[in-house]
Amino acid sequence: MTSYIIWQPYQNSTNHIMSTRIPITIYNRIIQKTQFNLIFIGANLTFLPQHFLGLNGIPRRYVDYRDTYSFIHTLSSLGSLLSLRASILFLAII
């Protein structure tokens, strides 16, 4: 939550700079904010479960893991897919 509070003013100032530097192109602010929130949630869903897996003592670079960790791995994979979709949305905005 703290990082969201820190990065939100940066995003708002970037939106203002982009909209004043390129006056011909009008960006949809709702789509911009949606993309920002999706990339924020996707990055956190990708890396926070991996952090907690490391705290639980799971070793890295193993091909096969225990079934007890499958939900956390699935959550991390879904976060990665969400980040990918947010990146595609970013390219569509530009």
Image (spheres, grey):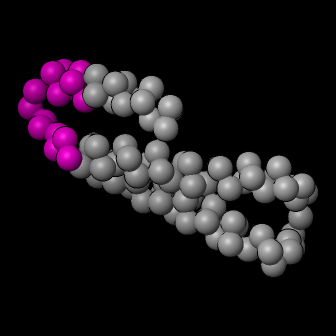
Residue at image position (45%, 48%) is: 39
Residue at image position (68%, 72%) is: 71
> Which image quarter: residue 11?
top left
Q: Is residue 77 left or right of residue 83?
A: right
Q: Is residue 84 left or right of residue 90?
A: right
Rendered position, 94 above or below 20: below
Provide residue 14's location: percent of width, then percent of height: 30, 25
* The magenta stretch spans residue 92: no
Residue most extreme to the bottom: 67
Provide residue 23's location: percent of width, then percent of height: 10, 27
Rendered position, 22 above or below 27: above
Q: Is residue 86 left or right of residue 68?
A: left
Residue at image position (13%, 36%) is: 25
Rendered position, 3 above or below 39: above
Provide residue 9's location: percent of width, then percent of height: 34, 25
Could you tell me how many numbered marks the image carries? 0
Provide residue 93's location: percent of width, then percent of height: 26, 47
Which residues fall within the magenta stretch?
14-30
Residue at image position (61%, 54%) is: 46
* The magenta stretch spans residue 20: yes
In this view, the residue in front, 57 or 32, is: 57
